[in-house]
Amino acid sequence: MSLARKGRLITLIGLGLLALVYVRALAFTPVERLQGPAQKIYYLHVPAAIWAETAMFLVGLAGIFYLFLKDPRLDRFGAASAEAGTVFAGVVLTTGPIWGKPIWGTWWTWDARLTSTLFLFFLYIGYLLLRGAVDDAALRARYAAVLGICGMCLVPFIHLSVYLFRTLHPQPIVLKPSAPSLPGSMLVTLLLSFGVFTLLYVGFVMQRYALALAQAQPDERSAHA
Amino acid sequence: MRDWLSQAWTVARKDLLLEFRTRTGIVSALVFTALVLTVFNFGRDPTAVPTIDLAPTILWVTFTFAAMLAMNRAFQLELENDALEGLLASPLSRTSLYWGKLLANLVFVALVEAVGLPLFVLFFDVPVAAVLLPLVGVIALATLGFVAVGTLFGALVIRTRFAELLLVVILLPFLIPPLIGAVQVTARLLGGRPLSEAGGWLRLLAAYDIAFVTLATLLFPFTVDE
Amino acid sequence: MEGGAGGGRVVALDDVTFTLQAGQTLAVFGPNGAGKTTLLKVLAGLIRPDAGRATVAGGRGAIGWIGHQSHLYAHLTVRENLLFWAALYHVPAASRAHRAAEVMQRLGIAEHARRPVRALSRGLAQRAAIARALIHEPRVLLLDEPFTGLDLAAAAEFRALLSQLRGAGRVVVLATHNVGEGAELATDVAFQRRGRFVHFAPRGGRAPAEIAEQYRRALGDAGA
């Protein structure tokens, strides 16, 4: 089975499992006391946020290896990971407000996770725009690697800025969206969801990678003409 | 070591000489700064929000935008003069080239800030006399960080479409941590609070500078070499 | 040098190997797109070949490049330009001014020393570009289509200058698509087509016309 087909299969399985996780979340996981049913979106929100960030690290890592090894596969992987990361960041940024409105009464709040993910989203957009602005494949790969590495190194600073800002400006909200301690059943659901998101990441990356490979093939063929 | 520094200075000197010969870059940046500060004044309602609360943000947004104007020209200049290849073919080390450009950019931005700060004080009647020295220190600390990244990205965008626009877009996320830090420290200084209260932010600025100056120096050769 | 340079989609240089000693002048003839510029760039260290390597005794500092781009800053004066490039090429500070004056004298542009480059005519600007390439007294000269845009008189002057320069134990590599231009200066001749050397031999006693004929025959079929 080709890479693209495998990727699509994994993605579909992932989406199917996600639906199952949600059945579990809605029917078999207790409703959170303070937040009510809206809290259920948490199971989408948190794993997506984790993967949005992890994807950036992988982009940076791929960049480092590319600069030394010059293997175009690393560049394709970086691009695929960036696109997957953008999607996940988008999920966080849309589920956040959906969660926030019933609980806080506002669509947007500058809480740690949303803010960090917003900056991450800007990073991804910049990365994808840079890729789009360079025609030559080798040049594009090199530039993307440089930006990816810088992006990866920026992430800790984003967290630091947000952390410093929050400790000095305590949020007026009583409810913490990122509750660290969860009762067992909720934790299990969360972990399951995380597993599913991992699967989704892999599926997305495989599909995008396959697409990039297919686009690159004609060029490689003409090189040996 | 000294050779590396002197070569960097040779590049910086040439850039500054060119800049002051043509003057278009520096004049636009200065005019832009004055314009932004003026517009901010008309955009606010002094009865609703005291100036002092907004002042740090106004100052830093102005500086950042003016700096972005400056950073574009560093490598654009070489492209315009068809000189980039010449620089790369010469024995000039890539690191010296980066540091030379960084130095020239810093001088350029420092000049804009040196004019912008008094204008800011004038327009918004902000008491800076007591904290002038620490304020200048913070300005220098924050500026180094984003100019270091901006210089690297300036080299990154020269062979792309819509170079100026792209530079702004990819630079934006990298401006946020130093900008937030600078605004926080500036706010504390202008509010008469001791600098120690802003310790965390100062450490952030310093760490950012060290991290990104190093990273930019390491990555620069990959940006210009084929 | 030896090796090849890819570039991803197009193979610009394919299996080129040669060594040049002091006093040799290699003329590389080939149509546009044959890879002549790529060859020179690999020699200058501007492009790293995908395979193989290029070594120039003395490194970058020993190379003088004359090509399409002038590498002169339009708003700086000729003298300022020369001093800048001299500094980059490690000409000792004390001798820079002297060398600049010398090379400007040699190229007949001394009286324009303090004029900005953008104020110079095309011919003068070209001479300034040559001055820039020579100021550090390079032992290796790389010339990429140096006769482009020169009228007959200027071309003759340049040829005279070149024959002076190559005498002093220098290595010269000259790339051009015009077989008539470099042949009489060369000690070695190469024809390049699609990245490969289809001919590489000492000039022997061949007259330029003969070389031109051989070139036409070697590259006439199938063209570029």
Image (cartoon, rainbow, N blue to C red):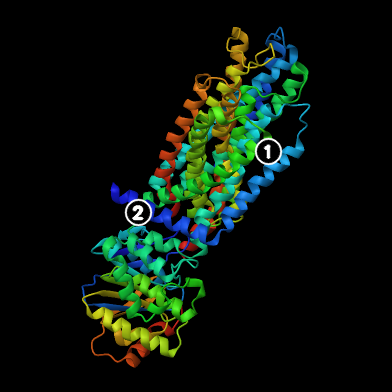
Outermost residue on the front side: it is B129
Question: Which residue is painted at 42% across and 73% down in the image?
Answer: C34
Q: Is residue C24 above or below residue B53?
A: below
**In terms of image quadrants, where is residue C37?**
bottom left
Q: Earlier in the sequence, mark 2 or mark 1?
A: 2
Circle 2 marks a residue in which chain?
B
Q: Within 10 Å of the Cα at label 1, are there few (<14), some (14-19), or many (20+) other Cα atoms?
A: some
Chain letter of the residue beneath label 1 in the structure image: B
Residue C71 spot, x, y in % from top left: 43, 67
Q: Is residue B2 above or below residue B117?
A: below
- Mark 2 surroundings: few (<14), some (14-19) or many (≥20) residues within 10 A: many
- Specify the label residue B123 is tagged with: 1
Q: What residue is drawn where x is 63% and y is 27%? A: A115
**Which numbered dot is residue B7?**
2
The image quarter containing residue C39 is: bottom left
Task: Kindly identify the amino acid type of the residue bearing the numbered disc 1.
Answer: Phe
- The local secondary structure at tag 1 comes to helix
Q: CA distance from mark 2 to mark 1?
A: 41 Å
- Say if B79 sits above or below B153 in the image: below
Q: Secondary structure at mark 2?
A: helix
x and y percentages locating residue C107 in the rendered image? 35, 80
Residue B26 at x, y percent in the picture:
57, 53
- The part of the image, by quadrant, that contains residue B55 is top right
Amino acid type of the residue tagged 2 in the rendering = Gln
Is residue B135 or residue A8 the one in the foreground?
Answer: B135
